[in-house]
Image (tube, rainbow, N blue to C red):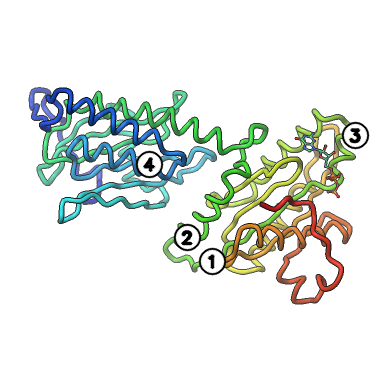
Amino acid sequence: MSIDPVATVDSVPSRSVEVPGWVSGGEATQARLVDSVAHFTHQRDTEALDHSLTLSLAELADARTVTLYKRAGERSGPQESLVRCSRNALGRFNIDLVPRSADASTDLLLQQGERDGGCVRLRDGGYGMLVPIRHDGRMIGALMLESEHPLEMLRPLVEGFARIYANYVGLLDESERDKLTGLYNRRSFDRHLQRQLHGTRPREGEQAGQTWLAILDIDHFKRINDTWGHLYGDEVILMIAQQMRASFRHGDALFRFGGEEFVVLMSAIDREAATAALQRFRTRVQDHEFPQVGQVTVSVGFAVIGPHDYPATVLDRADKALYFAKNSGRNQVFSYEDLRARGALDGDVTAGSVDLF
Ligand SMILES: Nc1nc2c(ncn2[C@@H]2O[C@H](COP(=O)(O)OP(=O)(O)OP(=O)(O)O)[C@@H](O)[C@H]2O)c(=O)[nH]1
C-alpha cells in the first residue's frame, strides 16, 4: 500500500503491546539478530546496504512493508529516493527502488518522524512506526514499518538498525569520495555508470535521454601550481568542483578522477543538449574570478555511452575529444561523435592523458 501520512491516525496507546514471537525468544533469537547485523554490515555499496537493511527489518519485525526514505545528501534541494521492501501474495519479500522527487506526503512523513518518530494506526487497521535516521546530527532519512501487529516493542531494535545504517552510510560515502572536493572518486565510477545506464527513468512528461560521459580538464594547471603554489592550485580544484555542482543537474554524477581531471556522467536528450550543458559549465569557469589566480579555463571532451559500451572505450573516446580540444587552443568543448563525423580524428590521434582501466 502507499504510505500516505493522511492515512495515519491516532498515536498507539502505550499499553497495546503484541510482539512477534521471536522478540521474546532466547539464543536462537539472538543468533538471528546477530546474523542479520552481520549480513547487513557485509555490504560494500550503498544500494546493497539499503536492500539489506529493509529486508532484515522486514524479516525481524515480521512487517508487511519496510520503507527507507533517503534524503539527497550531497546537494540542497528536495530530491529523495525511496527503497521499499514488501511482502507479496506468496509471502515472499520484494524490494523496489523508486527514485523520486519529494512530494508533500514524503515531506510530511519526515516532519512527523522528526517531531516524534510516532507509532501510528493506519486507516486499514494496521500499525505503522516511523523512525528517523540521523548522521552527524542531520536527518538523512527515515524508516517506516507497517505491520499487522503493534510495533512499539520493536522501536529500540529499529532505532539500533537506523544508527548502524547511518554510521555505515557515512563510511561507505567516505570511501567513494575524493577527500579534497567531496566529489565521487574514480573507484566508484563503474558502479555509477551501471546505475546511470540502467537505473534512470525519465520523469513524467520527460523524454528518455541518452547518457554522456565528459572529461573536464583544467587548462595549464601546472602553470597555476608553478606560479602560485600548490595551495592555490588546490583552491582552484575546489572551486572547479563547486562550479560543477552548480552547473550540472542533480541526477548527474560528478567525479574527480585525480589531479586536475574531472568526469561527469550526465543524461541529456541529444548531443545539442549535452553540448549546451557543458558549454554553460565552461563559460561559467571562464567568467569566474579565482582568488589571486584570476582567470582559469577548462577543456572538455565528451562521448555518448551506448548500453553495451565498456567504460574504458567511452573514456578513451571522450579523452580523444579532450585531446583535440587541448590541441585546438583549449577552453573549448568537443564531442567525439561530432569530430568523428567531420573526419577530424582520422589519422594521427594519440591517446590523451587519461589512464584507462
Ligand atoms: N595543486 C595540485 N596540483 C596537482 C594535483 N594533482 C596533480 N597536480 C598537478 O597538476 C599538473 C598537471 O599538469 P599537466 O598534466 O602537465 O597539464 P596542464 O599543465 O594542466 O596542461 P594542459 O592540461 O595541457 O592544459 C601537474 O603539475 C601536477 O603536479 C593536486 O591535487 N593539487
Mark nearer the viewer, 1 or 3 = 1
The x and y percentages for residue 334 are 76, 63
Q: Give the residue type that dot 3 points to.
A: Asp
- The residue at the point 63 percent across, 65 percent down is 304
Secondary-structure class at tag 3:
helix
Asked whether the residues under the numbered discs 2 and 1 touch, taking CB atoms below 8 Å apart as contact, a structural biologist would say: yes
- The residue at the point 77 percent across, 37 percent down is 236
Q: Nearer the viewer, residue 90 or 128?
A: 90
Mark 2 residue crowding within 10 angstroms, few (<14) / some (14–19) / many (20+): few
- The residue at the point 25 percent across, 46 percent down is 3
Which residue is denoted by mark 2 in the rendering? Answer: 198
The circle on residue 50 is 4
Which of the two discs, 2 and 4, labels the residue nearer the N terminus? Answer: 4
Q: CA distance from mark 4 to mark 3?
A: 45 Å
Q: Nearer the viewer, residue 98 or 2?
A: 98
Secondary-structure class at tag 4:
helix
Asked whether the residues under the numbered discs 2 and 4 touch, taking CB atoms below 8 Å apart as contact, a structural biologist would say: no
Q: Give the residue type that dot 2 points to.
A: His
Quadrant location of ligand 1?
top right
Which residue is denoted by mark 3 in the rendering? Answer: 226
Q: Give the residue type that dot 1 points to.
A: Pro
Which residue is denoted by mark 1 in the rendering? Answer: 307
Give the image quarter of residue 331. Answer: bottom right
